[in-house]
Amino acid sequence: MFQSVIDSPRRHGVIDVRLRRTLWGVAGLASSIIAVVVAVVATEALPALRGVELPRFLNDPSWHPTNQRYNLAPMIAGTFLVAGGAVALGTLFGFLSAIFCCFYAPPRLAGLYRGVMELLAGIPSVILGLWGLTTLVPIVAAIKAPGFSVLSATLVLGLMIVPTIGLVAIASLQSVPRSLILGAEALGLPKWLTVVRIAFPAARSGLIASVVLGIGRALGETMAVMMVGGNIVQVPESLFAPVRTLAANIALEIPYAEGLHRSSLFVSGLFLTLVILVVLCIAEWLGPEPIHD
Amino acid sequence: MIRAISFPFRKGRSFLALSVMALLSVAASAHAAETIVLTGSSTVAPLMAEIGKRFEETHPNLRIDVQTGGSSRGVRDARAGLADIGMVSRPLTDSERDLTAFTLAYDGVAFILHKSNPVKTLTRQQIIDIFTGKVRDWSEIGPGRGTIVVENKAEGRSTLELFLTHFDIKSSDVKAAVVVGDNQEAIKVIAGNPLAIGYVSIGSAVTEAGLGVPIKPLPMDGVEATIDAVKQKRFPLVRELNLVVRKQPEGVVKEFIAYAQSDQVTDLVKDLYYVPVGH
Protein backbone atom coordinates (compact mmCIF):
# COMPACT_ATOMS: atom_id res chain seq x y z
CA MET A 1 0.00 0.00 0.00
CA PHE A 2 2.75 2.39 0.91
CA GLN A 3 4.48 1.23 -2.21
CA SER A 4 1.62 2.40 -4.39
CA VAL A 5 1.66 5.88 -2.89
CA ILE A 6 5.34 6.22 -3.49
CA ASP A 7 4.88 4.81 -6.97
CA SER A 8 2.65 7.67 -7.99
CA PRO A 9 4.51 10.81 -7.01
CA ARG A 10 2.21 12.98 -9.11
CA ARG A 11 -0.90 11.95 -7.21
CA HIS A 12 1.00 12.44 -4.03
CA GLY A 13 1.82 15.96 -5.11
CA VAL A 14 -1.80 16.77 -5.94
CA ILE A 15 -2.94 15.65 -2.48
CA ASP A 16 -0.25 17.76 -0.92
CA VAL A 17 -1.30 20.84 -2.86
CA ARG A 18 -4.94 20.37 -1.96
CA LEU A 19 -4.14 19.74 1.65
CA ARG A 20 -1.94 22.82 1.77
CA ARG A 21 -4.69 24.99 0.28
CA THR A 22 -7.29 23.63 2.68
CA LEU A 23 -5.05 24.18 5.68
CA TRP A 24 -4.22 27.71 4.56
CA GLY A 25 -7.93 28.34 4.17
CA VAL A 26 -8.83 26.96 7.60
CA ALA A 27 -5.99 28.83 9.29
CA GLY A 28 -6.99 32.03 7.48
CA LEU A 29 -10.62 31.61 8.49
CA ALA A 30 -9.75 30.98 12.13
CA SER A 31 -7.48 33.99 12.39
CA SER A 32 -9.87 36.26 10.51
CA ILE A 33 -12.68 35.30 12.90
CA ILE A 34 -10.49 36.46 15.76
CA ALA A 35 -9.80 39.67 13.88
CA VAL A 36 -13.54 40.18 13.31
CA VAL A 37 -14.28 39.57 17.00
CA VAL A 38 -11.69 42.13 18.08
CA ALA A 39 -12.98 44.56 15.45
CA VAL A 40 -16.58 44.16 16.65
CA VAL A 41 -15.59 44.66 20.28
CA ALA A 42 -13.58 47.74 19.32
CA THR A 43 -16.45 49.16 17.23
CA GLU A 44 -18.93 48.65 20.06
CA ALA A 45 -16.48 50.23 22.51
CA LEU A 46 -15.99 53.28 20.31
CA PRO A 47 -18.99 55.36 21.50
CA ALA A 48 -17.80 55.08 25.11
CA LEU A 49 -14.19 55.76 24.19
CA ARG A 50 -15.37 58.89 22.39
CA GLY A 51 -18.06 59.98 24.85
CA VAL A 52 -16.13 59.35 28.06
CA GLU A 53 -12.59 60.63 28.50
CA LEU A 54 -10.24 57.70 29.05
CA PRO A 55 -9.03 58.68 32.56
CA ARG A 56 -12.63 58.63 33.78
CA PHE A 57 -12.65 54.84 33.45
CA LEU A 58 -10.08 54.88 36.24
CA ASN A 59 -10.97 57.88 38.39
CA ASP A 60 -14.73 58.43 38.22
CA PRO A 61 -16.28 58.37 41.70
CA SER A 62 -17.97 54.98 41.15
CA TRP A 63 -19.40 52.47 38.69
CA HIS A 64 -22.96 53.63 38.15
CA PRO A 65 -23.12 53.65 34.37
CA THR A 66 -26.82 54.57 34.31
CA ASN A 67 -25.81 57.75 36.16
CA GLN A 68 -22.81 58.41 33.90
CA ARG A 69 -20.16 57.12 36.29
CA TYR A 70 -17.77 54.72 34.70
CA ASN A 71 -15.00 53.78 37.13
CA LEU A 72 -13.69 50.36 36.12
CA ALA A 73 -10.68 50.48 38.47
CA PRO A 74 -12.17 48.41 41.34
CA MET A 75 -13.11 45.68 38.87
CA ILE A 76 -9.70 45.75 37.23
CA ALA A 77 -8.16 45.36 40.67
CA GLY A 78 -10.62 42.58 41.49
CA THR A 79 -9.86 40.77 38.25
CA PHE A 80 -6.10 40.81 38.83
CA LEU A 81 -6.47 39.90 42.50
CA VAL A 82 -8.67 36.87 41.90
CA ALA A 83 -6.86 35.75 38.75
CA GLY A 84 -3.46 36.23 40.40
CA GLY A 85 -4.39 34.20 43.45
CA ALA A 86 -5.98 31.48 41.36
CA VAL A 87 -2.99 31.24 39.02
CA ALA A 88 -0.63 31.02 42.02
CA LEU A 89 -2.72 28.22 43.50
CA GLY A 90 -3.21 26.53 40.16
CA THR A 91 0.49 26.69 39.27
CA LEU A 92 1.55 25.32 42.64
CA PHE A 93 -0.85 22.39 42.64
CA GLY A 94 -0.68 21.89 38.89
CA PHE A 95 3.11 21.59 38.90
CA LEU A 96 3.10 19.40 42.00
CA SER A 97 0.52 17.13 40.37
CA ALA A 98 2.63 16.94 37.23
CA ILE A 99 5.79 16.07 39.17
CA PHE A 100 3.88 13.43 41.10
CA CYS A 101 2.46 11.90 37.93
CA CYS A 102 5.70 11.93 35.96
CA PHE A 103 8.30 11.03 38.58
CA TYR A 104 6.92 9.67 41.82
CA ALA A 105 3.62 7.88 41.28
CA PRO A 106 3.51 4.22 40.28
CA PRO A 107 2.37 4.10 36.62
CA ARG A 108 -1.14 2.87 37.38
CA LEU A 109 -1.80 5.52 40.00
CA ALA A 110 -0.32 8.15 37.70
CA GLY A 111 -2.75 7.10 34.97
CA LEU A 112 -5.67 7.20 37.38
CA TYR A 113 -4.67 10.60 38.77
CA ARG A 114 -4.35 11.98 35.28
CA GLY A 115 -7.80 10.65 34.50
CA VAL A 116 -9.17 12.47 37.53
CA MET A 117 -7.54 15.69 36.37
CA GLU A 118 -8.98 15.26 32.89
CA LEU A 119 -12.38 14.79 34.46
CA LEU A 120 -11.94 17.93 36.55
CA ALA A 121 -10.91 19.84 33.45
CA GLY A 122 -14.10 18.71 31.76
CA ILE A 123 -16.52 19.82 34.48
CA PRO A 124 -18.49 22.84 33.22
CA SER A 125 -17.68 25.98 35.18
CA VAL A 126 -21.31 26.52 36.13
CA ILE A 127 -21.23 23.21 38.00
CA LEU A 128 -18.12 24.22 39.90
CA GLY A 129 -19.81 27.54 40.57
CA LEU A 130 -22.86 25.77 41.95
CA TRP A 131 -20.63 23.67 44.16
CA GLY A 132 -18.92 26.83 45.36
CA LEU A 133 -22.25 28.52 46.00
CA THR A 134 -23.76 25.68 48.01
CA THR A 135 -20.67 24.31 49.75
CA LEU A 136 -17.71 26.66 49.75
CA VAL A 137 -19.55 29.95 50.35
CA PRO A 138 -21.32 28.71 53.52
CA ILE A 139 -17.98 27.41 54.85
CA VAL A 140 -16.30 30.76 54.23
CA ALA A 141 -19.37 32.53 55.65
CA ALA A 142 -18.94 30.54 58.86
CA ILE A 143 -15.52 32.16 59.26
CA LYS A 144 -16.66 35.61 58.18
CA ALA A 145 -19.93 36.75 56.56
CA PRO A 146 -21.13 37.00 53.83
CA GLY A 147 -19.04 34.19 52.31
CA PHE A 148 -19.21 35.66 48.82
CA SER A 149 -15.62 36.77 48.71
CA VAL A 150 -12.24 37.04 47.07
CA LEU A 151 -11.32 33.85 48.91
CA SER A 152 -14.24 31.82 47.54
CA ALA A 153 -13.67 33.11 44.02
CA THR A 154 -9.94 32.43 44.17
CA LEU A 155 -10.42 28.90 45.48
CA VAL A 156 -13.03 27.94 42.89
CA LEU A 157 -11.02 29.50 40.08
CA GLY A 158 -7.81 27.90 41.36
CA LEU A 159 -9.52 24.53 41.34
CA MET A 160 -10.52 25.09 37.73
CA ILE A 161 -6.98 25.99 36.73
CA VAL A 162 -5.17 23.10 38.42
CA PRO A 163 -6.06 20.64 35.62
CA THR A 164 -5.44 23.26 32.91
CA ILE A 165 -1.91 23.80 34.15
CA GLY A 166 -1.33 20.26 35.41
CA LEU A 167 -2.25 18.44 32.20
CA VAL A 168 -0.13 20.67 29.97
CA ALA A 169 2.74 20.41 32.47
CA ILE A 170 2.48 16.60 32.43
CA ALA A 171 2.59 16.58 28.64
CA SER A 172 5.63 18.83 28.53
CA LEU A 173 7.49 16.91 31.27
CA GLN A 174 6.78 13.68 29.41
CA SER A 175 8.30 15.12 26.27
CA VAL A 176 11.63 15.67 27.99
CA PRO A 177 14.02 13.24 26.27
CA ARG A 178 14.35 10.03 28.22
CA SER A 179 18.15 10.19 27.77
CA LEU A 180 18.36 13.33 29.91
CA ILE A 181 16.53 11.69 32.81
CA LEU A 182 18.48 8.44 32.46
CA GLY A 183 21.74 10.39 32.27
CA ALA A 184 20.88 12.20 35.50
CA GLU A 185 20.04 8.92 37.18
CA ALA A 186 23.29 7.40 35.95
CA LEU A 187 25.15 10.29 37.54
CA GLY A 188 23.48 9.40 40.80
CA LEU A 189 21.46 12.60 41.11
CA PRO A 190 18.62 12.35 43.62
CA LYS A 191 15.17 12.41 42.06
CA TRP A 192 14.22 15.87 43.26
CA LEU A 193 17.39 17.32 41.76
CA THR A 194 16.65 15.58 38.48
CA VAL A 195 13.20 17.16 38.51
CA VAL A 196 14.30 20.64 39.50
CA ARG A 197 17.57 20.95 37.57
CA ILE A 198 17.09 18.68 34.54
CA ALA A 199 13.42 18.10 33.75
CA PHE A 200 12.07 21.57 34.57
CA PRO A 201 14.63 23.54 32.52
CA ALA A 202 14.23 21.11 29.64
CA ALA A 203 10.44 21.44 29.71
CA ARG A 204 10.56 25.18 30.30
CA SER A 205 8.61 26.39 27.29
CA GLY A 206 5.84 23.85 27.84
CA LEU A 207 5.57 24.76 31.50
CA ILE A 208 5.38 28.45 30.67
CA ALA A 209 2.70 27.67 28.11
CA SER A 210 0.72 25.84 30.79
CA VAL A 211 0.81 28.86 33.09
CA VAL A 212 -0.16 31.19 30.24
CA LEU A 213 -3.15 28.99 29.49
CA GLY A 214 -4.02 29.16 33.17
CA ILE A 215 -3.76 32.95 33.21
CA GLY A 216 -5.95 33.19 30.12
CA ARG A 217 -8.60 31.02 31.69
CA ALA A 218 -8.38 32.85 35.02
CA LEU A 219 -8.85 36.27 33.44
CA GLY A 220 -11.72 35.18 31.24
CA GLU A 221 -13.62 32.80 33.51
CA THR A 222 -17.01 34.27 34.23
CA MET A 223 -19.74 32.00 35.47
CA ALA A 224 -18.10 30.38 38.48
CA VAL A 225 -16.57 33.64 39.69
CA MET A 226 -19.87 35.42 39.27
CA MET A 227 -21.64 32.82 41.39
CA VAL A 228 -19.28 32.91 44.38
CA GLY A 229 -17.58 36.33 44.21
CA GLY A 230 -20.52 38.44 45.37
CA ASN A 231 -20.10 40.96 42.54
CA ILE A 232 -19.96 44.08 44.67
CA VAL A 233 -18.07 46.82 42.87
CA GLN A 234 -15.30 47.71 45.31
CA VAL A 235 -11.60 47.25 45.84
CA PRO A 236 -11.79 44.35 48.30
CA GLU A 237 -10.44 45.25 51.74
CA SER A 238 -9.74 41.66 52.70
CA LEU A 239 -9.90 38.10 51.43
CA PHE A 240 -13.39 37.91 52.92
CA ALA A 241 -14.80 40.92 51.08
CA PRO A 242 -16.97 40.49 47.96
CA VAL A 243 -15.40 41.23 44.60
CA ARG A 244 -16.54 41.80 41.01
CA THR A 245 -14.34 40.90 38.07
CA LEU A 246 -14.52 42.52 34.64
CA ALA A 247 -15.81 39.35 33.03
CA ALA A 248 -18.53 38.99 35.67
CA ASN A 249 -19.45 42.65 35.19
CA ILE A 250 -19.97 42.13 31.47
CA ALA A 251 -22.07 39.01 31.98
CA LEU A 252 -24.18 40.63 34.71
CA GLU A 253 -24.99 43.87 32.99
CA ILE A 254 -24.90 43.38 29.23
CA PRO A 255 -28.36 41.84 28.78
CA TYR A 256 -30.10 45.07 29.78
CA ALA A 257 -27.42 47.67 29.17
CA GLU A 258 -28.16 50.61 26.88
CA GLY A 259 -26.13 53.25 25.09
CA LEU A 260 -22.93 54.32 26.80
CA HIS A 261 -23.45 51.76 29.56
CA ARG A 262 -23.41 48.98 27.00
CA SER A 263 -20.52 50.53 25.15
CA SER A 264 -18.45 50.91 28.32
CA LEU A 265 -18.90 47.18 28.96
CA PHE A 266 -17.29 46.62 25.58
CA VAL A 267 -14.46 48.91 26.70
CA SER A 268 -13.80 46.55 29.59
CA GLY A 269 -13.97 43.63 27.15
CA LEU A 270 -11.42 45.32 24.93
CA PHE A 271 -9.21 45.91 27.96
CA LEU A 272 -9.38 42.22 28.95
CA THR A 273 -8.45 41.22 25.41
CA LEU A 274 -5.45 43.55 25.47
CA VAL A 275 -4.28 42.19 28.83
CA ILE A 276 -4.41 38.63 27.52
CA LEU A 277 -2.52 39.74 24.42
CA VAL A 278 0.20 41.28 26.58
CA VAL A 279 0.41 38.11 28.67
CA LEU A 280 0.84 36.06 25.50
CA CYS A 281 3.59 38.37 24.27
CA ILE A 282 5.45 38.14 27.58
CA ALA A 283 5.16 34.36 27.47
CA GLU A 284 6.47 34.30 23.93
CA TRP A 285 9.41 36.41 25.01
CA LEU A 286 10.11 34.34 28.14
CA GLY A 287 10.10 30.91 26.59
CA PRO A 288 11.52 31.14 23.08
CA GLU A 289 12.84 27.63 22.42
CA PRO A 290 12.94 24.43 24.42
CA ILE A 291 16.48 23.88 25.69
CA HIS A 292 16.72 20.27 24.58
CA ASP A 293 16.29 21.06 20.90
CA MET B 1 -32.67 31.38 30.37
CA ILE B 2 -33.69 35.00 30.38
CA ARG B 3 -30.27 35.93 29.16
CA ALA B 4 -30.49 33.53 26.24
CA ILE B 5 -33.82 34.95 25.24
CA SER B 6 -32.81 38.54 25.63
CA PHE B 7 -30.17 38.51 22.93
CA PRO B 8 -32.24 38.03 19.80
CA PHE B 9 -33.93 41.40 20.15
CA ARG B 10 -30.58 43.07 19.77
CA LYS B 11 -30.54 42.26 16.10
CA GLY B 12 -29.16 45.12 14.16
CA ARG B 13 -27.09 46.28 17.12
CA SER B 14 -23.74 44.79 16.30
CA PHE B 15 -21.97 44.74 13.02
CA LEU B 16 -21.83 40.95 12.89
CA ALA B 17 -25.48 40.47 13.69
CA LEU B 18 -26.28 43.12 11.15
CA SER B 19 -24.44 41.39 8.36
CA VAL B 20 -25.98 38.04 9.24
CA MET B 21 -29.39 39.66 9.29
CA ALA B 22 -28.65 41.30 5.98
CA LEU B 23 -27.79 37.94 4.44
CA LEU B 24 -30.87 36.29 5.89
CA SER B 25 -33.20 39.05 4.87
CA VAL B 26 -32.11 39.18 1.24
CA ALA B 27 -34.80 36.70 0.30
CA ALA B 28 -37.44 38.51 2.32
CA SER B 29 -36.56 42.00 1.12
CA ALA B 30 -36.91 40.90 -2.47
CA HIS B 31 -40.57 40.56 -1.59
CA ALA B 32 -40.71 44.05 -0.06
CA ALA B 33 -41.56 42.78 3.40
CA GLU B 34 -43.72 44.83 5.72
CA THR B 35 -42.12 45.73 9.05
CA ILE B 36 -43.62 46.48 12.44
CA VAL B 37 -41.19 48.50 14.56
CA LEU B 38 -41.37 48.30 18.37
CA THR B 39 -39.15 50.35 20.65
CA GLY B 40 -38.98 50.96 24.39
CA SER B 41 -38.73 49.16 27.71
CA SER B 42 -36.08 46.48 28.06
CA THR B 43 -38.46 44.62 30.39
CA VAL B 44 -41.02 44.20 27.64
CA ALA B 45 -38.58 43.79 24.75
CA PRO B 46 -37.53 40.14 25.35
CA LEU B 47 -41.19 39.17 25.57
CA MET B 48 -42.12 41.04 22.39
CA ALA B 49 -39.12 39.56 20.56
CA GLU B 50 -40.40 36.06 21.34
CA ILE B 51 -44.00 36.93 20.52
CA GLY B 52 -42.79 38.58 17.32
CA LYS B 53 -40.93 35.47 16.26
CA ARG B 54 -44.02 33.34 16.71
CA PHE B 55 -46.17 35.88 14.85
CA GLU B 56 -43.72 35.95 11.94
CA GLU B 57 -44.14 32.20 11.50
CA THR B 58 -47.72 32.71 10.38
CA HIS B 59 -46.96 35.96 8.52
CA PRO B 60 -44.08 35.15 6.17
CA ASN B 61 -43.96 38.63 4.61
CA LEU B 62 -43.87 40.47 7.90
CA ARG B 63 -40.87 41.44 9.96
CA ILE B 64 -41.10 42.42 13.63
CA ASP B 65 -38.25 44.72 14.61
CA VAL B 66 -37.81 45.08 18.39
CA GLN B 67 -35.44 47.72 19.80
CA THR B 68 -34.80 48.68 23.40
CA GLY B 69 -34.19 52.10 24.93
CA GLY B 70 -36.35 52.34 28.02
CA SER B 71 -40.02 53.16 28.55
CA SER B 72 -39.45 56.83 27.85
CA ARG B 73 -38.15 56.01 24.40
CA GLY B 74 -41.22 53.85 23.85
CA VAL B 75 -43.49 56.81 24.60
CA ARG B 76 -41.39 59.21 22.56
CA ASP B 77 -41.12 56.99 19.49
CA ALA B 78 -44.78 56.02 19.49
CA ARG B 79 -45.72 59.71 19.70
CA ALA B 80 -43.31 60.76 16.95
CA GLY B 81 -44.33 57.89 14.73
CA LEU B 82 -40.77 56.51 14.72
CA ALA B 83 -42.15 53.24 16.04
CA ASP B 84 -45.45 51.55 15.22
CA ILE B 85 -45.72 50.40 18.82
CA GLY B 86 -44.01 51.67 21.98
CA MET B 87 -43.17 49.35 24.88
CA VAL B 88 -43.76 50.89 28.31
CA SER B 89 -43.32 49.02 31.59
CA ARG B 90 -45.60 51.30 33.67
CA PRO B 91 -49.08 52.80 33.41
CA LEU B 92 -49.36 55.86 31.19
CA THR B 93 -49.28 59.17 33.06
CA ASP B 94 -51.84 61.96 32.70
CA SER B 95 -49.64 63.81 30.25
CA GLU B 96 -49.53 60.74 28.05
CA ARG B 97 -53.28 60.46 27.50
CA ASP B 98 -52.79 61.08 23.79
CA LEU B 99 -51.54 57.49 23.58
CA THR B 100 -53.53 54.31 23.94
CA ALA B 101 -52.16 51.50 26.11
CA PHE B 102 -52.77 47.76 25.73
CA THR B 103 -51.74 45.79 28.81
CA LEU B 104 -49.84 42.59 28.02
CA ALA B 105 -48.96 41.32 31.45
CA TYR B 106 -48.12 42.30 35.01
CA ASP B 107 -44.79 42.12 36.73
CA GLY B 108 -44.64 41.95 40.51
CA VAL B 109 -41.61 41.94 42.77
CA ALA B 110 -41.50 40.16 46.11
CA PHE B 111 -38.85 39.94 48.79
CA ILE B 112 -37.68 36.43 49.52
CA LEU B 113 -35.95 34.82 52.49
CA HIS B 114 -34.65 31.34 53.13
CA LYS B 115 -37.44 29.05 54.27
CA SER B 116 -35.75 28.51 57.65
CA ASN B 117 -35.65 32.25 58.43
CA PRO B 118 -38.12 32.87 61.28
CA VAL B 119 -38.95 36.40 60.10
CA LYS B 120 -42.55 36.47 58.87
CA THR B 121 -42.94 39.98 57.58
CA LEU B 122 -40.97 43.18 57.12
CA THR B 123 -42.21 46.76 57.14
CA ARG B 124 -41.33 49.26 54.46
CA GLN B 125 -38.92 51.02 56.81
CA GLN B 126 -37.25 47.74 57.84
CA ILE B 127 -36.64 46.86 54.20
CA ILE B 128 -35.15 50.29 53.52
CA ASP B 129 -32.93 50.00 56.62
CA ILE B 130 -31.73 46.53 55.64
CA PHE B 131 -30.92 47.47 52.06
CA THR B 132 -29.17 50.72 52.97
CA GLY B 133 -27.06 49.05 55.66
CA LYS B 134 -28.63 50.75 58.72
CA VAL B 135 -29.70 47.37 60.05
CA ARG B 136 -27.02 44.72 59.72
CA ASP B 137 -28.13 41.85 61.93
CA TRP B 138 -31.35 39.85 62.02
CA SER B 139 -31.41 40.23 65.82
CA GLU B 140 -32.21 43.93 65.31
CA ILE B 141 -35.41 42.94 63.49
CA GLY B 142 -36.92 40.27 65.67
CA PRO B 143 -36.64 36.52 65.72
CA GLY B 144 -33.36 35.09 64.50
CA ARG B 145 -29.78 36.32 64.56
CA GLY B 146 -26.76 36.59 62.29
CA THR B 147 -25.36 39.08 59.81
CA ILE B 148 -27.91 39.88 57.12
CA VAL B 149 -26.70 38.99 53.63
CA VAL B 150 -28.26 41.59 51.34
CA GLU B 151 -28.70 40.53 47.74
CA ASN B 152 -29.15 43.18 45.06
CA LYS B 153 -29.64 43.06 41.28
CA ALA B 154 -27.22 44.26 38.62
CA GLU B 155 -27.62 47.70 37.04
CA GLY B 156 -30.20 47.86 34.31
CA ARG B 157 -32.40 45.04 35.65
CA SER B 158 -36.07 45.92 35.70
CA THR B 159 -36.63 44.46 39.16
CA LEU B 160 -33.90 46.74 40.53
CA GLU B 161 -35.58 49.71 38.89
CA LEU B 162 -38.98 48.83 40.37
CA PHE B 163 -37.45 48.22 43.81
CA LEU B 164 -35.57 51.53 43.82
CA THR B 165 -38.57 53.55 42.66
CA HIS B 166 -40.97 51.92 45.08
CA PHE B 167 -38.78 52.51 48.12
CA ASP B 168 -37.32 55.76 46.83
CA ILE B 169 -33.71 54.62 47.31
CA LYS B 170 -30.75 55.64 45.20
CA SER B 171 -28.84 52.82 43.55
CA SER B 172 -25.60 54.05 45.15
CA ASP B 173 -27.13 53.92 48.65
CA VAL B 174 -27.81 50.19 48.52
CA LYS B 175 -25.26 48.32 50.64
CA ALA B 176 -25.32 44.78 49.31
CA ALA B 177 -23.15 41.74 49.95
CA VAL B 178 -24.08 40.01 46.70
CA VAL B 179 -25.15 41.28 43.31
CA VAL B 180 -26.77 38.87 40.90
CA GLY B 181 -28.19 39.05 37.40
CA ASP B 182 -31.45 37.26 36.85
CA ASN B 183 -34.18 35.90 39.09
CA GLN B 184 -32.99 32.30 39.02
CA GLU B 185 -29.52 33.23 40.22
CA ALA B 186 -31.10 35.37 42.92
CA ILE B 187 -33.22 32.45 44.10
CA LYS B 188 -30.23 30.09 44.10
CA VAL B 189 -28.34 32.44 46.40
CA ILE B 190 -31.23 32.80 48.84
CA ALA B 191 -31.91 29.05 48.79
CA GLY B 192 -28.28 28.46 49.74
CA ASN B 193 -28.08 31.04 52.51
CA PRO B 194 -30.37 31.11 55.58
CA LEU B 195 -29.31 34.70 56.40
CA ALA B 196 -29.92 36.22 52.98
CA ILE B 197 -32.64 38.53 51.71
CA GLY B 198 -33.32 39.39 48.09
CA TYR B 199 -36.08 40.33 45.69
CA VAL B 200 -37.32 38.65 42.52
CA SER B 201 -40.22 38.59 40.09
CA ILE B 202 -43.18 37.08 41.92
CA GLY B 203 -43.78 34.63 39.09
CA SER B 204 -40.33 33.11 39.52
CA ALA B 205 -40.57 33.05 43.33
CA VAL B 206 -43.93 31.28 43.30
CA THR B 207 -42.79 28.80 40.64
CA GLU B 208 -39.53 27.88 42.37
CA ALA B 209 -41.10 27.71 45.84
CA GLY B 210 -43.72 25.40 44.32
CA LEU B 211 -40.92 23.14 43.07
CA GLY B 212 -39.65 22.75 46.62
CA VAL B 213 -36.80 25.27 46.55
CA PRO B 214 -36.36 26.43 50.17
CA ILE B 215 -37.36 30.07 49.77
CA LYS B 216 -40.17 32.09 51.28
CA PRO B 217 -41.79 35.07 49.55
CA LEU B 218 -42.73 37.77 52.08
CA PRO B 219 -46.09 39.51 52.17
CA MET B 220 -45.98 43.26 51.57
CA ASP B 221 -48.17 45.66 53.53
CA GLY B 222 -50.20 42.63 54.63
CA VAL B 223 -50.79 41.30 51.10
CA GLU B 224 -49.52 37.77 50.38
CA ALA B 225 -47.16 37.49 47.41
CA THR B 226 -49.28 35.44 45.01
CA ILE B 227 -49.98 35.51 41.30
CA ASP B 228 -53.59 36.45 42.03
CA ALA B 229 -52.56 39.40 44.17
CA VAL B 230 -50.46 40.64 41.27
CA LYS B 231 -53.22 40.10 38.76
CA GLN B 232 -55.73 42.00 40.89
CA LYS B 233 -53.10 44.69 41.49
CA ARG B 234 -53.53 44.31 45.23
CA PHE B 235 -49.81 43.66 45.69
CA PRO B 236 -47.91 46.91 46.30
CA LEU B 237 -44.93 46.22 44.04
CA VAL B 238 -46.69 45.65 40.74
CA ARG B 239 -46.47 47.32 37.38
CA GLU B 240 -48.13 46.90 34.03
CA LEU B 241 -46.29 45.92 30.91
CA ASN B 242 -47.92 47.91 28.13
CA LEU B 243 -47.87 48.34 24.39
CA VAL B 244 -48.72 51.92 23.46
CA VAL B 245 -49.85 53.41 20.15
CA ARG B 246 -50.67 56.95 19.03
CA LYS B 247 -53.89 56.27 17.16
CA GLN B 248 -56.24 53.34 17.06
CA PRO B 249 -54.23 50.55 15.41
CA GLU B 250 -55.34 49.13 12.09
CA GLY B 251 -54.57 46.17 9.89
CA VAL B 252 -51.63 44.01 10.78
CA VAL B 253 -50.57 46.17 13.75
CA LYS B 254 -54.00 45.71 15.28
CA GLU B 255 -53.80 41.99 14.58
CA PHE B 256 -50.34 41.82 16.20
CA ILE B 257 -51.43 43.64 19.37
CA ALA B 258 -54.46 41.36 19.69
CA TYR B 259 -52.16 38.37 19.21
CA ALA B 260 -49.79 39.62 21.92
CA GLN B 261 -52.72 39.82 24.35
CA SER B 262 -54.15 36.43 23.37
CA ASP B 263 -53.98 32.96 24.92
CA GLN B 264 -51.60 31.90 22.16
CA VAL B 265 -48.66 33.60 23.87
CA THR B 266 -49.47 32.86 27.52
CA ASP B 267 -46.60 30.36 27.67
CA LEU B 268 -44.14 33.01 26.48
CA VAL B 269 -45.38 35.45 29.13
CA LYS B 270 -44.97 32.81 31.83
CA ASP B 271 -41.50 31.84 30.55
CA LEU B 272 -40.35 35.33 31.50
CA TYR B 273 -42.11 35.10 34.89
CA TYR B 274 -44.63 37.76 34.08
CA VAL B 275 -48.27 37.34 35.01
CA PRO B 276 -50.59 37.09 32.01
CA VAL B 277 -53.62 39.38 31.89
CA GLY B 278 -56.90 37.76 32.78
CA HIS B 279 -56.22 34.03 32.84
Image: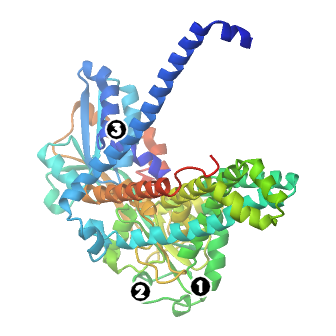
Q: CA distance from mark 2 to mark 1?
A: 22 Å
| Element assignment for label 1 | loop
Query: Which residue is under mark 1?
Result: A144
Furthest toward the front, the residue is A187
The kind of residue on which mark 1 rests is: Lys
| Element assignment for label 3 | helix
Query: Which residue is under mark 2?
Result: B129
Image-based side of B160 in relation to B85, left or right: right
Mark 2 vs 3: CB contact within 8 A: no
| Element assignment for label 2 | helix
Query: Which residue is under mark 3?
Result: B17
Image-based side of B174 in relation to A131, left or right: left
Instruction: Write down the quadrant of residue A1 in the picture.
Output: top right
Q: In the image shown, does B165 or A235 lie closer to the viewer?
A: A235
Quick check: can you spot residue A285?
A: yes
Q: Identify the coloring.
A: rainbow
The residue lying at 56 percent from left, 92 percent from top is B139
Image coordinates of residue B231 in percent, x first then y, are 42, 58
- Of discs 2 and 1, which sits in the foreground? 1
* Disc 2 residue crowd, few under 14, some 14–19, many 20+, Cα 10 Å: some
The kind of residue on which mark 3 rests is: Ala
Q: Earlier in the sequence, mark 2 or mark 3?
A: 3
B43 in relation to B193, above or below: above
Image coordinates of residue B158 in percent, x first then y, are 36, 61
The residue lying at 44 percent from left, 48 percent from top is B269
Q: Are marks 2 and 3 on the same chain?
A: yes
Image coordinates of residue B69 in percent, x first then y, are 25, 53
B176 in relation to B81, above or below: below
Mark 3 chain = B
Q: In the image shown, does B52 or A271 lie closer to the viewer?
A: A271
Mark 1 vs 3: CB contact within 8 A: no
